Image: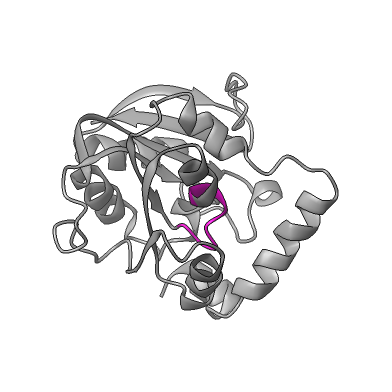
Amino acid sequence: MSRWKELTGGTSGEDYARRFAALAGSGRDMHGEARFCAALVPPGARVLDAGCGTGRVMIRLAELGYECVGIDLDASMLAVARRQAPELNWIRADLAEFDPAECGAAADFDLVVAAGNIFPLLAPGTEARVAGRLAATLRPGGLLVAGFGLDEAHLPVPPGITLAEYDACCTAAGLTLVDRFATWDADPYEGGGYAVSVHRC
């Protein structure tokens, strides 16, 4: 079982959506992840949102002109995403088990984004498998972007993966580290409890 499922029971979609709606209503910028991705690939590029949740990042990327597919296992989160953007392609699948070919996602994406602490919230021991499956969705030269917390101050659960371990998973999947930042605003990474990593296929 994933750490996300243990944490939420798979029923937190509506609560999650309300929390982010409240943040947006307070004037908080909710589109840093999408803006970061848009700086890496041009409009029209194909983007896979891995662990898409309620679709906040993917819906914004679609608005900016990207061709998007979202994958998530949490039905309650996908229900919100489908209600907000029924015209987009939402797939319910386990990131550790999905077959990229069966999802129409094999070697065809310019960028995969895994925002929202996806890797620390996976089932322990599946991180390398997930990295391999996500890498298999990328065309040659495509990018995997993952942002996640590294300490308890930046995570809802105890830390589950270090940057060194994540990089090792990516290397095993045939990916090479391109850059690393401290935030989705592309602040330089100089250590600390959160990192956004960019790997190339």
The residue nearer to you, when weighing 80 against 127, is 80
Q: Residue at x 46, y 45 (%)?
A: 62
Q: Quadrant of the C terminus?
A: top left
Membership of 116 in magenta stretch: no
Task: Please tell me whether residue 189 is drawn above or below residue 153 in the rendered image.
Answer: above
Residue 124, x across and y down, in percent: 39, 63
Left-right relation of 101 to 118: left
Q: Quadrant of the N terminus?
A: bottom left
Task: Please tell me whether residue 8 is drawn above or below residue 198 in the rendered image.
Answer: below
Residue 37, x across and y down, in percent: 47, 32
Residue 110, x across and y down, in percent: 29, 35
Membership of 55 in magenta stretch: yes
Q: How many tags in the picture?
A: 0
Q: Which residues are magenta?
A: 52-58
Quarter of the view holding residue 96 = bottom left
Q: Residue at x 48, y 69 (%)?
A: 82
Left-right relation of 39 to 27: left
Q: Residue at x 66, y 65 (%)?
A: 17
Task: Please tell me whether residue 83 is drawn above or below residue 163 in the rendered image.
Answer: below
